[in-house]
Image: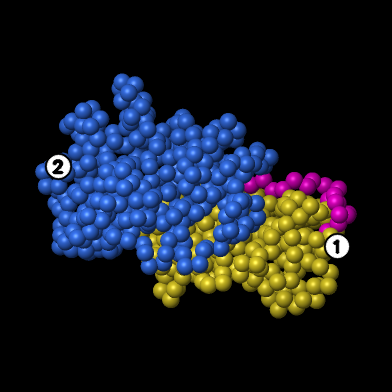
Chain colours: A yellow, B blue
Amino acid sequence: MKEFELIQNIFQASMMANTQGRDDILVGIGDDCAQVAVPPGQSLVFSMDTLVEGRHFPLDADPVDIGYRAVATCVSDLAAMGAKPAFFTLALTIPESDPQWLAGLAQGMAELAEPIGLILVGGDTTKGPLTLTLQVHGYVEAGQTALRSHAKLGDDIYVTGLLGDASAAVPIVTGEVQVSSERFDYFYDRFWRPAPRLIAGMALKRVVHAMMDISDGLAQDLQHILKASGVGAKLDAHALPISDTLCQWQPEAAVTLALTGGDDYELCFTAAPEMADEIALITQTLHLPCTKVGKIVASGFDIDGYQGERHGWQHF
Amino acid sequence: MKEFELIQNIFQASMMANTQGRDDILVGIGDDCAQVAVPPGQSLVFSMDTLVEGRHFPLDADPVDIGYRAVATCVSDLAAMGAKPAFFTLALTIPESDPQWLAGLAQGMAELAEPIGLILVGGDTTKGPLTLTLQVHGYVEAGQTALRSHAKLGDDIYVTGLLGDASAAVPIVTGEVQVSSERFDYFYDRFWRPAPRLIAGMALKRVVHAMMDISDGLAQDLQHILKASGVGAKLDAHALPISDTLCQWQPEAAVTLALTGGDDYELCFTAAPEMADEIALITQTLHLPCTKVGKIVASGFDIDGYQGERHGWQHF
């Protein structure tokens, strides 16, 4: 068990486990349970995600990248609820304890967790096939979450950022496809460093109806909103926000990737048409691209200008 | 992904995912995050545990047993904090989706979770080697947790229940050792159906100083209290509570198993000597054996009447 104490020490020593100045964290790492006092007027929101090596990230990936991306993808669910990140737990199953690898993982996690105030307060370490389970927790005023079930007939459908880059990047990060170093750097970053839209989520929650993050591709994820809200949608394939880099590299596949590629971790939300100016103001202030890509209709799911594949992204 | 929707349906349909009558659960399974309003005056405590097949439970174990025990072992951490169980999340990694196996797992979890008011509110399902990670959450008044660091010089050391049965049971439940059917039934139950001492924990937290649950063996776990509190201990090996069944089956090994065997999930706590009557009253009311096994001293860790092995239990 000595080696597993080492692991705890690595994570405990990292800045992201520092609870100083955090009145809400009553007990952090090291007791039977962590203990938290949720600030008055706030509710707790949380999401749990598991990443399995070879399935959610490639074998032999850089542990710094794994750590960063694990936190980013999980925190993206807080963004989708308009919540402020607060703390997280980590269940780490590893085949052996390699201190250098673990330090890399902790560093990658801290790179994102520390600046957004997400503190590591507990977890578990076990021996077995490499698997990470994170539970991230945030605070939000009780009545102010943008649920998937709140889309309304006539709403505009928006997405933040650019779609398709992360899934286009998969064969590049796995080494299956060779590209120029400039292209490699762009796509490597797009896969490994998704930017959870936290501030956008917090600002938008007051003006949107339904909101979620896109992890399995817009076409698939939007259907969760449609199902939960009992409505349909009409998307405009020509409106999808796609990067110049992707358009140049994959002109044929770009639209399909933008529609069905996963791992983008952008926000998809619906809002009444009269909110357009306010949405533009918020996203422009944040220098965040935000694109109207369709409308909520009574039923069905049509994509104008597109006849291709609609299945969501299957990981590795 | 269809098969993974099936899994979610199995768990969602189980009684333990029923949030009716629970004002604290604002959003359960099915959105980006679950959302909870912690009741006024209460703090949130939580613990995360991972169980890996072949390491924390035997290969080919009954899924009902796996489910029950997974919840029991994790909930035991809530008992150690004197907290009331509230809700849990489940990250399930499975090699394939076998509906019958999954229904068994859900049934076993519900058998314990439902009567104690522990509701399933979220999680993740992924494909990979069989691994379960649970995070259980409970409520407790902010100032009333019995932490590991609160042991005081002169305290008595107590344990609840009987020690050693669960680790003695391991070769029986794995089929390595054959015993009479009566003995099999006793030990099978002692391994697979630990009883988290929830009510005892809630009642005792007001009268004890330090408290924790015993998962890796008394000798090893007690040292966490000693280290956190900066004190020592003197245990009396002859005082350890051991079942007649274990004494008869393993007269030589019984004390070692009681000291170093894991998986008992009893409470170990320290309290001022003048609390003895109150502790007796609480535990007798609950018909729960409770035994004074030693004293907190200034430093060191001695076990009177014992010269054997002290290492904590290594799982499978």
Helix, strand or loop for disc 2: helix
Tag in front: 1 or 2: 2
Asked if residue A302 lies in the magenta stretch, the reply is yes
Question: Element type at marker 1?
Answer: loop
- The magenta span reads A293-316
Q: How many other residues sit within 10 Å of disc 2, few (<14), some (14-19) or many (≥20)?
A: few
Query: Measured from the top left, where is residue A308 in percent x and y?
Result: 82, 47
Per the model, the C-alpha gap separating discs 1 and 2 is 76 Å
Q: Residue at x 39, y 50 (%)?
A: B198
> Callout 2, which amino acid?
His
Q: Who's the residue at 46% across and 70% down the image?
A: A24
Residue A156 image offset from top left, x and y in percent = 82, 64
Was residue B241 drawn as part of the magenta stretch in this picture?
A: no
Quarter containing the C terminus of chain B: top left
Q: Which of B90 and B54 is in front in this view?
A: B90
Above or below: residue A226 compared with residue B245: below
Look at label 1 and name its amino acid.
Gly
Q: Which chain carries label 2?
A: B
Q: Check disc 2 and report the residue beneath it.
A: B238
